[in-house]
Image: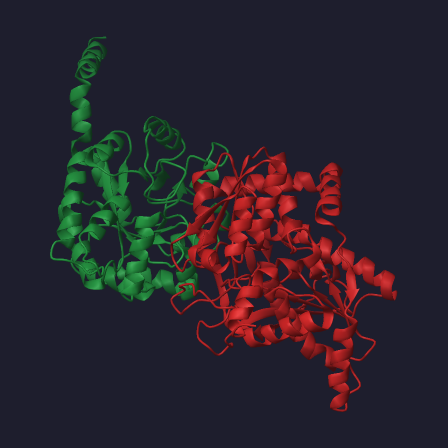
Chain colours: A green, B red
């Protein structure tokens, strides 16, 4: 099985962007960071700023794969009283205004497991969630949530990493749907990526094995980083940079300031310009080759 | 319901790393190939007689095994006296399995040497570990010094403050101690940070986990390395008394010393088995204890499903115990399974009970126990009087108390 039983907003969004000829900007924010009202205002303004897909973090006390920035965001959210139920409420409130932008919940398994998988899936679907990324559920644990989620009509998006070799890749892709999230480096969120050359090869390798869109994340901080990845990937995921921008706008007691939402959305707008301009720039740079291919097409016509 | 008894309690885990509902491999994809590698390498090592021979030789000449099985005569007689004073006739014969006499002062070294030999087989040059009280950190730093390996130990910043002597020991042994400032800054956060290190340094690093928990194959592997405790105790009791013990008692944080003692006896139906969790300020005090089985419920953390202390939203609680080695919100998955199937009875002892046992053992036996086995001893003091005098009870004295004297002095208001 390589596709979900039903088409989700995620599938529709990537299809539309493919037709448009550009990559998706996938933005991560933590639910309830630094409080639920600010978080909702931020969610509502993300699509207008240029976010094509929203990843919404479920706060957890022990985020084992996250760096200091996202750890701190989760703790701020928990301190403000955020829970899984309130995270779903946030999605419902967002959905009341926006029917098109896909929402992917991202987090760790324990809050979902404790909530109860069937109840969680039903409530998430009803709230308007489209997909799930649960970091600590590898393919070996698909029976836990991945397969039930797919049956419930939610995409289960799996991470592929530099340690996912050719032998393992089919297992990772087997029950994945929506898109594949390629983690560009071995490490935690927020780490710096110095060398992008291997990433495009890895994306090409995964593309040979699946028709699903490939989004690349980890280490994307600037519009230039985003543009570099958007040339060959179907999506660019930005998380830590946005969480950092939000953190910088808070006061000493971690309360939202008047410019908190804008601090994030202005960076999203910047990143979005990078993503949107990426392939246009590429085409310009490749002009001689485009000419050659045009001549090639003429030659084929004549023959 | 029709309860089914398995043919053996010693067959777990299954090929997916499960002990019934518990265990598993709940890790990020980046780590998945690494733990599959580890599982393969451990399987090969287990089947290689030269691996076991090298480990046995180290355990004998470097650690000082076998550790004695010691008849705690005065403790036995003291408890018989108390029993007689209230008209009872009981009072089990109490033996201590003296793993506190091991090199580095606790059972931790048994497991560490096994994992370090495995790391060498796998060609890994850099070892990382988490530690709470510092015992596992010291054992890991020791083995790394012995084999010339780089060693980084993650320790919660709160624990670094509480356990300064062990921090110094690790540094003397050449390890780098990294204080962990994230989360609650205790053992669970040290484990998070070690996992983050492992995710980052996948090619050269071996994660030496200190307890019988974490993703498969760690719970089974650590149990196997610690089973030397139970295997020795069995042979020693047969030699001393000509028969098996009637009961076993051990303390439980993650539960590696306990599973090491218990596992070889699980199929000996006549042997009663008791695990003792840390009840801290009391089981009824919210977030005031570290008894995952008595006060927690099944959840997923640090790579396995097991009983965890958490709130209704699935957020992990910190737990409390006077003993930094029991101060962990989870427990090894095999214990969760043994509890649910009823093979092992799990009890708990409060800080106060442990402190009383700590003092009694010091005065009666001339042995200053660590605060961790003082929890087990507290329950021995309750159980032994209820048993007849020919009842043979073995308690795992899994660590010595040198590291705890300052903490105890503080609690007792100076000495």
Residue A294 image offset from top left, x and y in percent: 18, 15
Q: Which residue is outermost to the front?
A: B415
Q: Nearer the viewer, residue B201 or B369?
A: B369
Does B325 sit above or below residue A3?
below
**Residue placed furthest toward the left:** A258
Is any part of residue B210 visible from this angle?
no
Left or right relative to B156: residue A84: left
| Residue located 39% across and 33% down the image | A206
Q: Nearer the viewer, residue A10 or A104?
A: A104
At a point 43% along the width and 46% down the height, the residue shown is B196
- Horizontal relation, residue A274 to residue B197: left or right: left
Q: Quadrant of the C terminus of chain B?
A: bottom right
Percent coordinates x, y for residue B7 in the rendering = 73, 61
Foreground residue among B183 and B159? B159
* Residue at 44% across, 75% down: B286
Give the residue drawn at x 16%, y 31%. A277
Residue A104 placement (x, y as % from top left): 30, 51
């Amino acid at each position: 099985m390589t596709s979900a039983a039903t088409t989700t907003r995620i599938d529709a969004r990537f299809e539309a962007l493919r037709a448009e000829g550009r990559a998706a900007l996938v933005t991560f924010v933590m639910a309830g960071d630094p409080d639920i009202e600010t978080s909702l205002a931020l969610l509502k303004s993300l699509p207008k700023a240029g976010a094509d897909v929203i990843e919404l973090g479920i706060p957890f006390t022990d985020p084992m794969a996250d760096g200091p920035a996202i750890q701190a965001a989760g703790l701020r959210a928990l301190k403000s009283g955020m829970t899984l139920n309130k995270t779903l409420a946030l999605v419902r409130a967002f959905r009341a205004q926006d029917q098109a932008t896909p929402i992917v919940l991202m987090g760790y398994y324990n809050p979902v497991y404790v909530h109860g998988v069937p109840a969680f899936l039903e409530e998430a679907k009803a709230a308007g969630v489209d997909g799930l990324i649960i970091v600590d559920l590898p393919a070996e644990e698909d029976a836990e949530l991945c397969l039930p989620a797919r049956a419930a009509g939610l995409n289960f998006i799996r991470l592929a990493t530099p340690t996912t070799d050719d032998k393992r890749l089919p297992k990772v892709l087997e029950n994945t749907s929506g898109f594949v999230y390629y983690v560009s480096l071995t490490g935690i969120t927020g780490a710096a990526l110095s060398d992008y050359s291997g990433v495009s090869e890895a994306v090409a390798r995964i593309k040979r094995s699946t028709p699903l869109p490939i989004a690349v994340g980890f280490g994307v901080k600037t519009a230039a980083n985003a543009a570099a990845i958007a040339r060959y990937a179907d999506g660019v995921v930005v998380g830590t940079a946005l969480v950092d921008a939000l953190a910088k706008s808070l006061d000493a007691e971690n309360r939202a300031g008047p410019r908190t939402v804008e601090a994030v959305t202005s960076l999203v707008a910047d990143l979005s310009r990078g993503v949107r301009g990426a392939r246009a720039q590429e085409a310009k740079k490749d002009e001689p080759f485009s000419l050659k291919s045009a001549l090639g097409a003429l030659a084929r016509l004549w023959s | 319901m029709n309860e089914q008894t398995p043919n053996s309690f010693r067959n777990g885990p299954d090929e997916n790393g499960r002990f019934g509902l518990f265990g598993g491999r709940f890790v990020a994809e980046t780590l998945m190939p690494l733990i599959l590698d580890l599982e393969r390498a451990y399987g090969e090592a287990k089947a290689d007689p030269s691996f076991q021979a090298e480990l046995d030789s180290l355990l004998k000449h470097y650690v000082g095994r076998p550790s004695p099985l010691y008849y705690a005569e005065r403790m036995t007689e003291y408890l018989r006296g108390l029993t007689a004073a209230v008209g009872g006739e009981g009072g089990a014969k109490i033996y201590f399995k003296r793993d506190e006499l091991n090199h580095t002062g606790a059972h931790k070294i048994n497991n560490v040497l096994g994992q370090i030999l495995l790391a060498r087989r796998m060609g890994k040059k850099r070892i990382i570990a988490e530690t709470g009280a510092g015992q596992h950190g010291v054992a890991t730093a020791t083995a790394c010094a012995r084999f010339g390996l780089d060693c980084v130990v993650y320790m919660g910043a709160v624990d670094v403050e509480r356990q300064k002597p062990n921090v110094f020991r690790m540094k003397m042994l050449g390890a780098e101690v990294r204080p962990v400032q994230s989360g609650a800054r205790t053992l669970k956060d040290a484990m998070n940070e070690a996992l983050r290190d492992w995710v980052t340094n996948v090619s050269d690093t071996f994660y030496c986990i200190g307890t019988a928990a974490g993703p498969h194959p760690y719970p089974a592997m650590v149990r196997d390395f610690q089973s030397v405790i139970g295997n020795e105790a069995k042979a020693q009791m047969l030699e001393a008394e000509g028969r098996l013990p009637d009961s076993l008692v051990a303390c439980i944080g993650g539960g590696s010393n306990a599973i090491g003692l218990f596992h070889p006896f699980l199929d000996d139906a006549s042997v009663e088995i008791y695990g003792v969790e840390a009840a801290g300020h009391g089981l009824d005090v919210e977030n005031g204890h570290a008894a995952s089985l008595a006060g927690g419920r099944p959840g997923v953390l640090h790579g396995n499903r097991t009983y965890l202390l958490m709130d209704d939203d699935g957020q992990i609680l910190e737990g409390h115990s006077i003993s930094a080695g029991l101060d962990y919100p989870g427990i090894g998955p095999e214990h969760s399974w043994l509890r649910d199937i009823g093979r092992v009875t799990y009890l708990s002892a409060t800080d106060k009970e442990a402190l009383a046992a700590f003092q009694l053992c010091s005065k009666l036996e001339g042995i200053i126990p660590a605060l961790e086995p003082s929890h087990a001893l507290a329950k021995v003091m309750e159980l032994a009087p209820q048993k007849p005098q020919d009842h043979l009870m073995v308690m795992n004295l899994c660590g010595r108390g040198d590291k705890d004297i300052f903490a105890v002095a503080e609690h007792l208001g100076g000495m």
